[in-house]
Image (cartoon, rainbow, N blue to C red):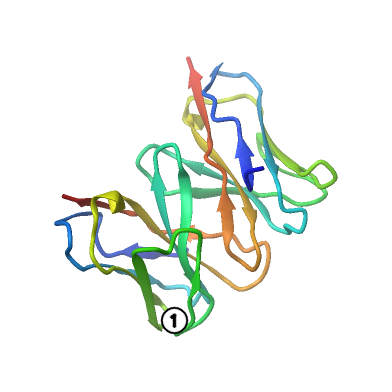
Amino acid sequence: RKEVEQDPGPFNVPEGATVAFNCTYSNSASQSFFWYRQDCRKEPKLLMSVYSSGNEDGRFTAQLNRASQYISLLIRDSKLSDSATYLCVVNRSGYALNFGKGTSLLVTP
Amino acid sequence: DVKVTQSSRYLVKRTGEKVFLECVQDMDHENMFWYRQDPGLGLRLIYFSYDVKMKEKGDIPEGYSVSREKKERFSLILESASTNQTSMYLCASSIQGYNSPLHFGNGTRLTVT
């Protein structure tokens, strides 16, 4: 099983739609979880951390399910500017992070 | 705001050359990392460092070395560049502690011919 697995997509959704991504991880001892966003030819940027209790930031909601070892990202009311690749990130031993290969999202008018 | 600066945005080198990629961060972060990113393979960890003069191998350290003589600077060295090292190289930093996200530089696209 790969360390961090994501559906690569692409997810094509119309503006205003709700879209959800899931990500599974293999290391049950992982303690840190993040979603990053990466635009084409740009560096990854932190979108949000994922906490055990779940967390929300505007239109974005992240959830963690430790029992099933997956995290999710929900985007409500999608905007054209949400088009990007979304990277699921989980810590390995110590402070280094493992990145999933990303899920591509395209929001269309 | 955290700033991670990579010395070059684009580099073209010849096979066999020794290549230095420099990274500087201005937020006094303890941890620094080098990743490479390739289509279909995602980000892969090359080396990381938790403190000055300390280094740890990541998943793909072969053909690379690193240097961290000062806290703010972390250099990646390709001892003898090869064409399979053509890639996007991303430097990142973070503070100590769990739940500390990485802050990335804007990357160096290296082409080895």
Identify whether A81 is placed above or below B97: above
Residue visible at 62% across and 39% down in the picture: A5
Identify whether B89 is placed above or below A74: below
Q: Is residue B106 visible?
A: no
Q: Is residue B79 visible?
A: yes
Residue B110 drawn at (x, y percent): 25, 53
Q: Quadrant of residue B38?
A: top left
Q: Please state if A97 lies on the left or on the right of B38 as rendered.
A: right
Q: Quadrant of residue A93?
A: bottom right
Identify whether B113 is placed above or below A10: below
Q: Which residue is the site of mark 1?
A: B71
Residue B101 drawn at (x, y percent): 58, 59
Residue visible at 53% across and 38% down in the picture: A102
Local packing at callout 1 (Cα closer than 10 Å; few below 14, some 14-19, many 20+) is: many
Residue type (three-letter) at the residue carrying disc 1: Lys
Image quadrant occupied by the N terminus of chain A = top right
Residue B44 drawn at (x, y percent): 47, 53
